[in-house]
């Protein structure tokens, strides 16, 4: 149900005349209050939970079937793929065996800020590097 406020008061639904006057004469505060009152009127016009609605109202509220295909979840990249993708942007890729797990952690803390890596991807890359570290 929508409340239509037109230039002519004869098309205004009951209760909306005072809201229209408030919006017109009340300035910024009046407009906000008028919007709140309109929303409250619309909410009161809806049937409450547990009440029986008419068949026409039930049909209007029934979900419409969509012909859209379900979205496919994006492929989650592995740590090796993320490492290759992000670290090769600025310098040659290093072998994970060149450093210890503790060294990779320190390096990744620094490079995460410089490369602007999201936290989840940084954790995945760090896990890959630590699992394949040399020592």
Image (cartoon, rainbow, N blue to C red):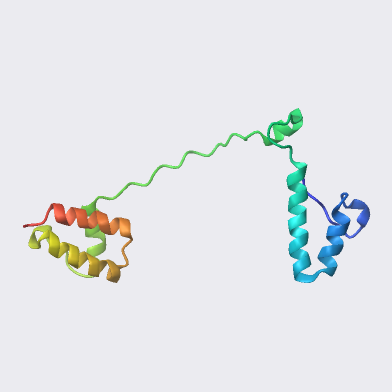
Find the residue positioned furthest to the left: 135
Q: Is residue 94 visible?
A: no
Work out whether residue 95 or residue 22 is closer to the camera in this orientation and state it: 22
Residue 14 placement, left or right of 123: right
Q: Is residue 34 visible?
A: yes
In the image, what residue occupies the spot 25% across and 54% down? Answer: 124
Question: Which quadrant is home to the N terminus?
Answer: top right
Residue 86 placement, left or right of 73: left
Give coordinates of residue 11: x percent, y percent: 90, 52
Give coordinates of residue 122: x percent, y percent: 27, 59
Question: Which quadrant is home to the C terminus?
Answer: bottom left
Work out whether residue 13 or residue 63 is closer to the camera in this orientation and state it: 13
Work out whether residue 122 or residue 51 is closer to the camera in this orientation and state it: 51
Give coordinates of residue 108: x percent, y percent: 22, 65
In the image, what residue occupies the spot 76% across and 30% down? Answer: 54
Q: Is residue 71 above or below residue 27?
A: above
Residue 53 placement, left or right of 15: left
In the image, what residue occupies the spot 14% across and 52% down? Answer: 131
Give coordinates of residue 6: x percent, y percent: 86, 57
Q: Is residue 101 above or below residue 50?
A: below
In the image, what residue occupies the spot 73% across and 63% down? Answer: 32
Count up the numbered dots: 0
């Amino acid at each position: 149900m929508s409340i239509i406020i037109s230039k002519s008061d004869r098309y205004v639904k009951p209760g909306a005349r005072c809201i229209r006057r408030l919006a017109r004469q009340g300035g910024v505060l009046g407009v906000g209050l008028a919007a709140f009152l309109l929303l409250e009127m619309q909410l009161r016009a809806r049937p409450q939970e547990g009440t029986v609605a008419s068949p026409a109202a039930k049909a209007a509220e029934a979900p419409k079937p969509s012909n859209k295909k379900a979205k496919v979840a994006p492929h989650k990249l592995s740590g090796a793929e993320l490492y290759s993708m992000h670290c090769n942007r600025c310098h040659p890729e290093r072998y994970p065996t060149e450093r210890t797990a503790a060294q990779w952690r320190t390096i990744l803390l620094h490079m995460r800020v410089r490369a602007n890596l999201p936290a989840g991807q940084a954790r995945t890359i760090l896990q890959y590097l630590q699992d394949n570290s040399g020592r």
